[in-house]
Image (cartoon, coloured by chain):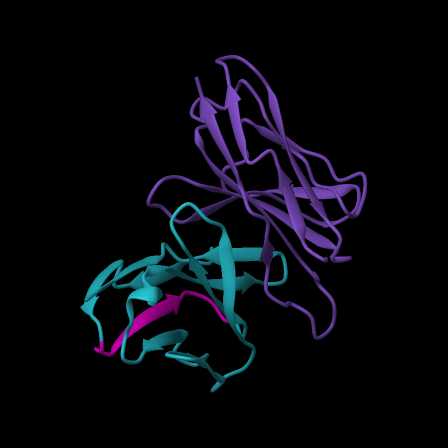
Chain colours: A cyan, B purple
Amino acid sequence: ELKVEQNPLFLSMQEGKNYTIYCNYSTTSDRLYWYRQDPGKSLESLFVLLSNGAVKQEGRLMASLDTKARLSTLHITAAVHDLSATYFCAVNNYGQNFVFGPGTRLSVLP
Amino acid sequence: DGGITQSPKYLFRKEGQNVTLSCEQNLNHDAMYWYRQDPGQGLRLIYYSQIVNDFQKGDIAEGYSVSREKKESFPLTVTSAQKNPTAFYLCASSIGRHIGGYTEAFFGQGTRLTVV
């Protein structure tokens, strides 16, 4: 059974600081996805990582994938309040469906 | 505009009632999914479908039913057998199992179901 873990589950950080969210998964997969969810809203796709060593960047967020370690990271640079949200990673389950991690709730404080 | 439309946005159900949540997509995607999200929690898979007239149970299918008669539509019925249905329901779609595929799942805006 495919399992996806994230840590930390809760993250409170000050504006301007850097931090990394980690996503581990339990089975072989070379496709990893990051999503953002604002309170009361649906999920918005942030990054699609399709191969080992893939790195994608958008603004203050950068995602990477290490398929050998079964690890993806979401790095936040110089956080701003607008980044406050819950971030989910997800893994494609052998083409059948998507398994999501529990989410990391990020609060960026002034 | 291409996308996924869920309706209604809010739904109230009385004890013992069946209710149906609508999900329609015009992205020409083969695969569709239903997830349930409880407050402060992650997403749990209810049902998924890779092709018309075929669907599979996810991790928490008990008390739910689906149909996939058309490529564009994947309605979810919450039956009276689902004892704790109050949650946020999210429908998603993706290209599906094509060579070079496995794009991300795209989500609708969700339906918030409350038992009264």
The answer to whether residue B21 is left or right of residue B70 is left
Q: Quadrant of residue B103?
A: bottom right
Magenta stretch holds residue B97? no
From the top left corner, tell me how far across and down residue B22 is, in percent.
66, 36
Q: Is residue A20 visible?
A: yes
From the top left corner, tell me how far across and down residue A43 is, in percent.
49, 55
Residue appearing at x 45%, y 56% in the figure: A100
Q: Is residue B62 visible?
A: no
Q: Is residue A29 above or below residue B44?
A: below
Magenta residues span A16-28
Magenta stretch holds residue A23? yes
Residue appearing at x 36%, y 46% in the figure: B41
From the top left corner, tell me how far across and down residue B6 is, in percent.
62, 41
Residue appearing at x 40%, y 49% in the figure: B42
In what quadrant of the picture does the C terminus of chain B appear?
top left
Is residue B61 or residue A15 the one in the foreground?
A15
Q: Is residue B6 above or below residue A70?
A: above
